[in-house]
Amino acid sequence: MGSSTAPLAGVRIIESSMLGPAAITTHLADLGAEVIKIESPQGDYIRQMTWPIVEGVSLMHLHINRGKRSLVLDLRTPQAVETYLDLVRGADVVIEAMRPGGLERRGLGYEKLREVNPRIVFCTISGYGMTGPYAELPSHGVAYDVWAGLVKPEITEDGFAAIPEHPSMGIHAGPLFGALGVLAGVIRARDTGEGCRLEIAQSDAAAAMDWLRSETWKAYERPESEVTGNASDGGKRRAPGTAGMRDGVRYQFYEASDGRHVLLQASEREFWENFCRGVNRMDLFEAHPGAKFADHAVGNTSLRTELRDIFLTRTAIEWVKLGLEIEAPIIAVNTPQTLADDPQFQDRFPWIPADRLGTEQTPTPIKYLDVDLPVPTKAPTVGQHSDEVLREVLGYSEPEIAALRESGALG
């Protein structure tokens, strides 16, 4: 039986955000934190960004801002600034998810926030960070992956350079690193009474997530007497990072009988032996036993040909089932479209229904075995919770709320 108390229940976060960086608090809201999104009277235009647009609202907004409450404050007015400070007094975290310095220009910089709450954790998340020659450069998500060397231009049939389909990295990894840093800051603040300030660049996060390739190139700058390849390759250096897998044989894609592909990962001798026994081809193991670890049989064209023919004898799902039976690492290749039909996905990622969030969404991948996580609420409309937050969080009376509205603080 799970607990009714979410892990982050009692953590209050004040968020000033625009667009994708607001995902830093999505993860925290999913775990039970209270997130109050402060918006200008015009609102965050994330609601009109990217595609698809679901009943007039972007999927990006519906996902990133789920589980949050929206309060409109026009920070050009002193009354709104004072209300913001009132919120900070009872908060654990302030998030500045936009170009650095936006809150400082409104008189709400870190030092001012510390005056009203010494325990506050202040986090700025932006594209290129607060320092460096690109700090003021406008950007969007693909930029961080391009900068980090993750996405290469492809050339169309007409000879134009084009952005290929690719997984996004920085725009997702940056918020995750940020959430980790924020929680570390909250633990420290609750223990010592001292808050802290941190900043996250989504470009840094993209580079950090792809550390293997960049660090391989750096290591290869050293002499070959100091940095070699793997022993299974006779010490010969492969191409850096994942590029070194291109010519693998026991670690490679193969087409199945239904036209789909599977990935074989029998780089350990134990798995390779299991595979050969499972397909009644121990002759392949005897002829090519390989090294104990990390042996992809690179460049063994004759073995690759044999495996190509073997994999054409079963469907992709049949190969996965065989891998389970014989303990051999084989997985079917999915696309973002076919993933939802995969039995592993269906078991672990039950869709949060559209009638709850406005469109079907995947849940957080964090699973507590003895705690029930809250089901997120639908992403808010601009200022949807203004009166509610002022009344419930700050204890403002109806006349006080009316006076704020009259002053223009609420837009």
Image (tube, helix red, strand yellow):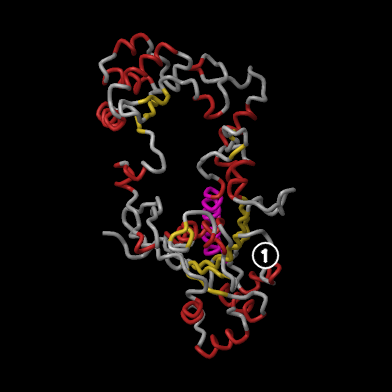
Left or right side of 393 for 196: right
- Alpha-carbon neighbours of circle 1 within 10 Å: few (<14), some, or many (≥20)? some
Q: Residue 55: x and y, percent?
A: 43, 63
Left or right side of 101 for 43: left
Q: Main secondary structure of the magenta part?
A: helix
Residue at 61% across, 62% down: 96
Q: Residue 214 appears in which quarter of the rendering?
A: top right
The boundaries of the magenta stretch are 172-193
Q: Residue furthest bottom?
A: 399
Where is mark 1, residue-wise?
Answer: 102
Q: Residue 190 in magenta?
A: yes
Q: Residue 91: x and y, percent?
A: 54, 70
Residue at 52% across, 29% down: 242
Q: Residue 304: x and y, percent?
A: 41, 16
Left or right side of 142 for 392: left
Q: How many labels does the image show?
A: 1
